[in-house]
Image (cartoon, rainbow, N blue to C red):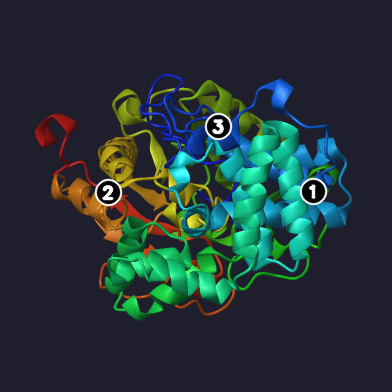
Amino acid sequence: MSGEGDAKRRDGRPGGSQGRSQGRPHGQRGGQARGGQSQGQRGEGQRGDQQRGPQRTVQPARRVAYDVLRAVSESDAYANLILPPAIAEARLDPQDAALATELAYGTLRRRGTYDAIIAAAADRPAEEIDPAVLDALRLATHQLLATRVASHAAVNESVNLVASTQGRGASSFANAVLRRISRETPGEWEERIESSARSDDERLALRSAHPVWVIRALRRALAAEGRADELDDLLEADNASPEVTLVALPGLAEPGEPRRPYAPTAYGSPGGDPHRLIAATGGTVRVQDEGSQLVALALTAAAPITSGERWLDLCAGPGGKTALLAAIAREHDVTLEANEVIPTRARLVRNALRGVPGEVVVHEEDGRSFGATHPGAFDRILVDAPCTGLGALRRRPEARWRKTPADVAELVPLQVELLSSALDALAPGGIVAYVTCSPHLAETTGVVQEVLRGRTDISEIDARAVLHGVSDSPIDLADDGSGRVQLWPHRHGTDAMFLALLQRSASEQGDASSEERD
């Protein structure tokens, strides 16, 4: 998952739904209150048309932000996918578009903290409040405690939102809750909710708006580098709005200004709607996190490129890294192929490749068996594995509330199968880049170690040395002795991308077949 405009789904699995569906955020019930609720629970959420007041005026930016929150809660939508078209449909000017973005993303990032504050002000658990009303309260709480929006405007417009969609009873409830929240400062609310925490990690979770399990996973990953003391900086970076980074496809476009420090293809957006720039360049410039660019570039720089090589992007959707690899392959007379098991995402890959001249075959096969059907066929393979996406929380703020430790347990076996399959698809001497947009140790070093445990034909390349060679300026990479790379938002200004480079021995002797490993 790498900031390329879509959250990477479970690409290695056949079928459309890809295993267990994304869980609804905790406490959300898709807009339907449970039967038998008390008046206190259901009274604020009655939605009978006869109980609604007259249509209330709501500023368009707030309406767009609220609609995004509802879509995320009700439909498990991805904010980064639905917000841009919502802004376009509402015809917001740049100022209002920026406001809608800040309101939607800021509210989603700090949802856990705001729910604790709302629960205290309402004197009931947040999950007992009608979901549609709760989203309006979250939106207003963000404005009251984290923006310069005037208190009266935040309260009045949010009450109008509730009144226009949920009725007069709900708006009265919302008004009372928000006026209680507005009477205390952000610092006072922080002290109040943290006083109820049962542990230091719970206190940090409320302060930083990260689930406890995520905090512990991030701490362990930093501790593995000897840098556990950077946790607060990392959590703060997760809650900051990231700058838009663009990629100029090599040989087809030149990077503009300001240049990013590491990837030679990366530069900052000049402002405005980046999609207009993308359209104007015919797709030779794209939105892509610098970390995503670096890991793709590392695969191409891991060994000298020989004309006639055959490359593969095994889990290609939505296609950002595929396009970058295709541009480099074109410069070196290399054949690139892609694989994406989900047809709709395979179409995204094909769309991403439109800006690159030449043909890239896009397979729609199960990545877990790709190595068996294409044994020894490729010289370089990118495995951008489906993962929890904990490395991209600043770009996908709702992800922290959707994911659970159960997702890790489900994803790790898939990641192991995909990486094993990719290694089987390698030609002698070929190289695999195993990449995740997660620093969770189970999804990174744990997967690599599990796969290597069963093979005698694979060795690791020093990915740190390769990335130092790729980078335009010195890059601070921790050295744990493995040669693997972990990027960080707080340290590098990128998503928390993980990279391991694995090479198959040049001789077939000593290879461990899939049957032997089973």
How many residues crowd around disc 3 within 10 Å: few (fewer than 14), some, or many (20 or more)?
A: some
Q: Which label number is shown at residue 74?
A: 3
Q: Quadrant of residue 128?
A: top left
Residue 168: assigned label = none
Where disc 2 sits, the SS reads loop
In this picture, is 462 found above or below 352? Answer: below
Q: Residue at x 49, y 76 (%)?
A: 475
- Residue at image x 14%, y 49%? 453
Query: Residue 11 vs residue 220: left or right?
Result: right
Q: Does the residue at mark 1 contact the one at mark 3 (Cβ under 8 Å)?
A: no
Residue 159 in the image: above or below residue 268: above
Q: SS of the residue at dot 3?
A: helix
Q: Amino acid at mark 2?
A: Ala
Looking at the rendering, which quadrant does residue 193 occupy?
Answer: bottom left
Pointer 3 or 2: first along the chain: 3
Q: Amino acid at mark 1?
A: Ala
Q: Residue at x 46, y 20 (%)?
A: 16
Q: Which residue is mark 2?
A: 506
Residue under pointer 1: 61
Q: CA distance from mark 1 to mark 3?
A: 20 Å
